[in-house]
């Protein structure tokens, strides 16, 4: 389902060589005894696209293929909130980026190649979008003692999609982000867990995904489920916060 990493062919482009020092390469390349070698700094042009998948990511749909690719994943050169937002707000716009191109070596990437963006410039007709909400500082409502999380995962297409709902006492908790978390590892193992100070007390999931509970996290194997033609995966679990003991309360 996910693209396997392919060997990227070295492409010599004469006009690029004239702008880069001797030995610089326009495309990244694999090396026999070590990590891949990144390309020289390159300017790329295309449409900046937000992919709302299991892993949300930003890609550049190129005006013309580069190093054999029609789309390259983008990362800010420094993983700071301000630099991430700099890319986010330009989604949907035609942009020109500058930075080195690298080969994706793990499943954490969504394309075979990625660019580390040092500079980005949008076309004059670009209409900036609102920055994505930052839920990182939100905490669960202190009055909530337990809640139920339901995750519906569509693993049928490259990148997939996930829908998440959280409810407590029959009413939805919105946004869900302060209450539920998940990660999809580079090896395509899916982990779901509760907010801090809450414990998983019960869960159920699509059996073909081989659900299990490890260190207060539920892990699933969506790749195996997909191989068994179970590409629609459901997970639901209950999170509970134990009330503070009398001794704890009196000590504060």
Image (cartoon, rainbow, N blue to C red):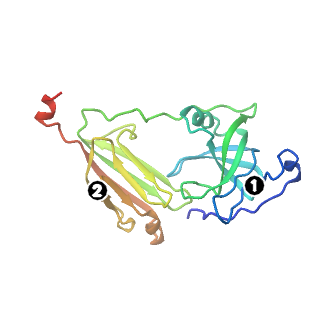
- Position of residue 113 measured from the top left corner of the image (x, y, whole percent): 66, 54
Q: Is residue 39 left or right of residue 105?
A: right
Residue located beneath label 2 in the image: 203
Q: Residue visible at 83% across and 57% down? A: 12
> Where is 63 relative to 145, above or below?
below
- Tell me the tag on residue 27: 1
Q: Residue visible at 75% across and 55% down? A: 27
> Where is 95 relative to 4, above or below?
above
- The quadrant of the image that shows the C terminus is top left
- Position of residue 7 measured from the top left corner of the image (x, y, whole percent): 69, 65
> Where is 237 relative to 243, above or below?
below
As helix, strand or loop, the secondary structure at mark 1 comes to: loop
Q: Is residue 231 left or right of residue 80?
A: left
Label 2 Cα crowd, 10 Å radius (few <14 / some 14-19 / many 20+): some
Q: Nearer the viewer, mark 2 or mark 1?
A: 1
> Where is 204 relative to 47, above or below?
below
Q: Residue furthest bottom?
A: 228
As helix, strand or loop, the secondary structure at mark 2 comes to: strand
Classify residue 31 by image quadrant.
bottom right
* Gap in angstroms between the C-alphas marked 2 and 1: 47 Å
Q: Is residue 120 left or right of residue 198?
A: right
Q: Residue furthest front?
A: 33
- Position of residue 192 measured from the top left corner of the image (x, y, whole percent): 37, 52
The tally of labels here is 2
The answer to which of 176 and 117 lies nearer the viewer is: 117
The answer to which of 13 and 178 lies nearer the viewer is: 13
- Position of residue 230 measured from the top left corner of the image (x, y, whole percent): 44, 67
């Amino acid at each position: 389902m996910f693209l396997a990493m392919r060997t990227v062919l070295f492409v010599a482009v004469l006009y690029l060589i004239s702008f880069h020092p001797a030995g610089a390469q326009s495309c990244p390349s694999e090396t026999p005894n070590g990590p891949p070698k990144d390309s020289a700094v390159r300017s790329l042009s295309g449409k900046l696209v937000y992919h709302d998948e299991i892993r949300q990511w930003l890609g550049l749909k190129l005006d013309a293929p580069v190093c054999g690719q029609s789309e390259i994943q983008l990362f800010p050169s420094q993983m700071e909130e301000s630099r991430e937002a700099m890319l986010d707000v330009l989604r949907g716009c035609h942009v020109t980026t500058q930075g080195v191109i690298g080969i994706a070596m793990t499943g954490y990437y969504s394309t075979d190649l990625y660019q580390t963006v040092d500079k980005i410039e949008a076309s004059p007709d670009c209409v900036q979008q609102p920055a994505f909400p930052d839920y990182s500082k939100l905490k669960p409502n202190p009055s909530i003692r337990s809640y139920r999380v339901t995750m519906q995962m569509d693993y049928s297409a490259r990148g997939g999609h996930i829908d998440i709902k959280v409810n407590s006492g029959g009413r939805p908790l919105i946004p869900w982000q302060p209450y539920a978390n998940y990660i999809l590892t580079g090896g395509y193992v899916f982990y779901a867990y509760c907010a801090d100070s809450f414990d998983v007390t019960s869960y159920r999931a699509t059996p073909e995904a081989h659900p299990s509970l490890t260190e207060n996290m539920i892990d699933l194997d969506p790749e195996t489920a997909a191989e068994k033609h179970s590409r629609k995966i459901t997970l639901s679990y209950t999170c509970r916060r134990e009330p503070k003991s009398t001794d704890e309360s009196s000590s504060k």
